[in-house]
Amino acid sequence: MTTADGQISPPEPPTPRRARWRAPLRLRTTFAFGAIALAVASLVALVCFVITRTTLITQREDAAERQAFLNARAVRSALRVDGTTPLDALSRVQTSSGGAGLLKVDGKWFTSVVGAGAADVPEALLDSVTDGSAARQRIDRSGVPTVAVGTPVVEAGAVYVELVPMDDVADTLGLLRRSLSLAAVAAAALGALGGWASSGRLLRPVRRMASAANSIREGALDRRLEADGDPDLEPLVTSFNEMVGELHTRIEREARFASDVSHEMRSPLATMTAALSITRRRVNDPAGLEALGMLEGEVERFSELVTDLLEISRAEAGVAEVHLETVEVVSFVQKLLDSTDHGGVKLDARCPADCRMSVDKRRIGQVLTNLLVNADNYAGGATVVRISDSASEVVIEVEDDGPGIPDHQRSYVFERFARGDNPEAPGTGLGLALVQEHVRLHGGTVEVRDGVTGGACFVVCLPRSGS
């Protein structure tokens, strides 16, 4: 926001909003695929189990009924022979393993095996058979599923009931149930895996677009997308590339305009400076000399502003040249401190004395000078310049003992004409913006952190080999 005196005031910090967590799209897609696969597999498994269960039980009951009728015929034939007892008749029946044959004659029950008796015969089944109709019924006999088949033996006035266990069918159905459950889980896992792979493939163009957008945000305006022959992505890719191309053209046009304006203003400024110098030598009036001094100060400030604008516009237009030279970092920084009247600032070298890197001496010298001047203008001066290194980069820190920079100002402190909370501070307001451009041209980064003593600490990270 611009104030009435033309200065840029810091933007108000945004009101924090409570972000509602939401699962990533790929995770949601994977879950949806897995849930659909599980639902379909479970439905198919349920249908298969119900059909198989019905078929197995019906077949077993039909077989038990046929076997019971055959055994009833054998009992009837045996009872026709004089002197045959009910137990003798039951000895001729062939029951399944674990099964039993029961015969009711003259109100008495006889059984072919020990452990079976009248208590195992359902009353409803016995009533149907007593009325002269064959019947069957499923029962639970000591925890074992069993089918009871009853048929009348009319000639002997008897009732024959056969108990056929169905534990083998229950075991088969249990095995089938477990197998279908595992199959449903496996289908869900395969569905989730397919959803993960499919969503990854579908989101790949989005990731490429995000990567391209990040590169463009960092200054790579020549970055473009490729549709890879996909007709569905072609319109999106075309629109994105046209947008970036138009943005690139507009930025280049504005940068060239700023560069041309700044360049054209240098000549009249030089003329004005020379004219002021001549006039000062010829004017003897104290009031006139004071006015000339004020005018010279403003012209000098305006000249610095134009020079900084020209430097920034050249960098943004992509025409800035970087001349790399190998320097000894500690010696380079110490000489710069001495040459800029900052020899009293402590130099804390946490790297070898012969630590070297490739830089543009003019640009990095201006980076450090601007940081030192910024500390003079806003924080009472720098207190320490710290140098450290690693295998790939050199880090230079300029720390002051001022009030520090609030968090909400750090996001725009490197913008043009940003002056924080002190719009009356000296300088052009372009020093830190120029620092960022010079560091970017070297492929490095610059940021603001909290200093050890509570002030601000500007951290410049530069690659050893330049950029």
Image (cartoon, rainbow, N blue to C red):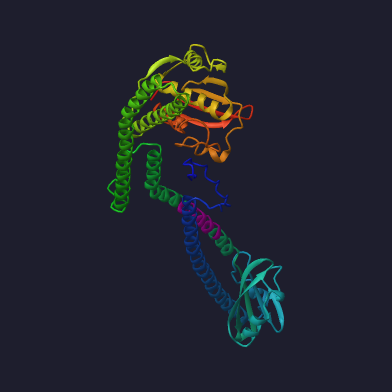
Q: Is residue 341 visible from the viewing direction of this image?
A: yes
Is residue 130 shown left or right of residue 242? right
State the image coordinates of residue 84 (x, y, percent, origin top left). 65, 78
- Where are the magenta residues, as a range? 177-191
Can the viewer see residue 85 in this picture?
no
**80 with respect to 228 (left or right):** right
User: Which residue occupies 50% across, 23% down?
Assistant: 395
Q: Which residue is farthest top?
A: 354
**Residue 220 vs residue 64, the one in the foreground:** 220
Residue 183 at what x, y percent from top left? 50, 56
Q: Is residue 399 left or right of residue 260?
A: right
The relative height of residue 457 versus residue 358 in the rendered view (above or below) is below
Residue at horizontal 51%, vertical 39%? 411
Residue 385 rendering spot, x and y as whole percentages: 55, 20
Q: Main secondary structure of the magenta part?
A: helix
Whether the magenta-drawn stretch holds residue 404 is answered as: no
Q: Is residue 114 above or below residue 156?
A: above
* Vertical arrangement, residue 269 with respect to residue 171, above or below: above
Q: What number of labels is visible?
A: 0
- 188 within the magenta span: yes
Nearer to me, 82 or 393: 393
Q: Quadrant of residue 121?
A: bottom right
* Observer-nearest of 37 and 181: 37
Q: Quarter of the image for the C terminus: give it.
A: top left
The answer to which quarter of the image holds residue 111 is bottom right
Which residue of the protein is positioned furthest toward the bottom in this rendering? 131
